[in-house]
Amino acid sequence: MKAAILGAQETASDFISFLNAAPTPFHAVAEAKRRLEAAGFTQLSERDSWALLPGGTYYFTRNFSTIVAFAIGKRFYPGCGFAIVGAHTDSPCPKLKPRSKIVKGGFLELGVQTYGSGLWHTWFDRDLTVAGRVMVRRGNGFSHELVHVKEPILRIPTLAIHLDKTVSEGFKINTQTQLVPVLASCIKDELSKSLPDENGALVAEDANSKAEAHHHSLLLKILSSELGCESDDICDFELQVCDTQPSSIGGALKEFVFSGRLDNLCMSFCSLKALIDSTSEASLENETIVRMVALFDHEEVGSNSAQGAGSPVMLDALKRITISMGEESSQNVEKAIQQSLLVSADMAHCLHPNYMDKHEENHQPKMHKGLVVKYNANQRYATNAVTSFIFKEIARRQDLPTQVIRIFFQGKTVRKANIFLLLWQDFVVRNDMACGSTIGPILASGVGIRTVDVGAPQLSMHSIREMCGVDDVGYSYRHFKLFFEDFSALDQHVNVD
Ligand code: ZN
């Protein structure tokens, strides 16, 4: 049995395939790129000059882990604004150290450093693997290649309760000494080294290779067989530990998404799909602005990198699009920025039924009620009355007629009910608790652009396995799509001067 707003189940299924293709930011960008190219978007290089056309759809990537895609309205001219949704491609995870080789207690282990603020205890006793990017020598050149080992080759075992009765009291972890994945036992590794190859010869170990001095040769063999190269051709890599359990739809009524990386691949997916689906010829015919999605790496560690939201990526894109669309005027970029709106989309905290006191009593986001608009007087979120009004008005204008919700059982509709087409809710953190932040204030202060912070509600944020609502995936996608389609017309009626 399943219950979802019309279209939400299909959007969520598409989201599941996006999640399963995106164990790392590199894979998320590659999957976004694949979808954009299938929809006719043209790749640009930041190393070249850009020649753009009204009605054109384009994208560029930076470091293979940040991607910016945009569609230019057919009536756009330099100085016109941008409707932007920004999100992030990264999530907390253990990443392999540059020298990951550890041999301890009869086991081969991998040294990892923690990336972001993960709920590290959730990584114990899971079937884990590695994914990321590898620099591979191919002939005389070197290429950046993605790798994702699908088998569960790693595990971080917990300590049995018999060996420490206090182990489950708070489960405190030393991430240096205890968050260390096991790759193999020494004994089996030694035996595998002396196994004859298919010609009957003993396999020789090349202990002189530089990579093998830093990483287990067993790991390099696994990577080289995935990549179809020799271990020696692996020049460098950035690998992270990830879960092998595929993302899925669950709950008795098939209303939840169970997955890692919902923060923030959910907003990345919904905004990307909304952009792709709002760029038909007809939709761009009377459009005066540029519709854009910017998915950044490194949000979980503060955004300060060459491809993070703290870099000039966004400003570079606004400048280059504005300038390449006509004669350069020193004021066109500034004019464009003041006519633009950034929706900073990052997952929000759903009210937790077992920890209700952690939420401010008048601001308790729930599942299946649409995007959460986030406010913070101390500017940890960049929302203000103008930007929240615009974002909510876009939904408000669409709330008639009401949408039919269908309850399915064994493939048949067994019940229908009416609900509003689009909903939204508000969030502030309690005064006695610390507030998280997003790329919203970073871009608002760096670019000077009007910004609203929003996100779909979820539980277990930063766990290896999080959960959100199927309907909220559908609501988020449709809210972003309406934002792209309706912002320029609505903004003409908002007096901001
Ligand atoms: Zn996030």
Image: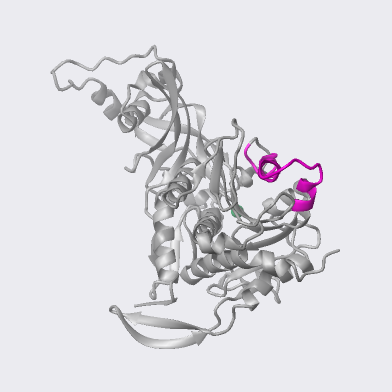
Res 233 → quadrant: top left
- The quadrant of the image that shows the C terminus is bottom right
User: What residue is drawn where x is 73% and y is 61%?
Assistant: 433
Position of residue 110 in the picture relative to residue 452 (left or right): left
Position of residue 306 in the picture relative to residue 31 (left or right): right
From where the camera sits, is residue 169 visible? no
> Does residue 318 belong to the magenta stretch?
yes
User: What residue is drawn where x is 75% and y is 40%?
Assistant: 328
Position of residue 48 in the picture relative to residue 19 (left or right): right
Q: Which of 165 and 433 is in front in this view?
A: 433
Q: What stretch is highlighted in magenta?
A: 307-336
Position of residue 334 in the picture relative to residue 113 (left or right): right
Res 14 → quadrant: bottom left
Q: Nearer the viewer, residue 49 or 194?
A: 49
Q: State how the image is colored.
A: one colour
Question: Residue 172: image x %, image y %?
Answer: 56, 49
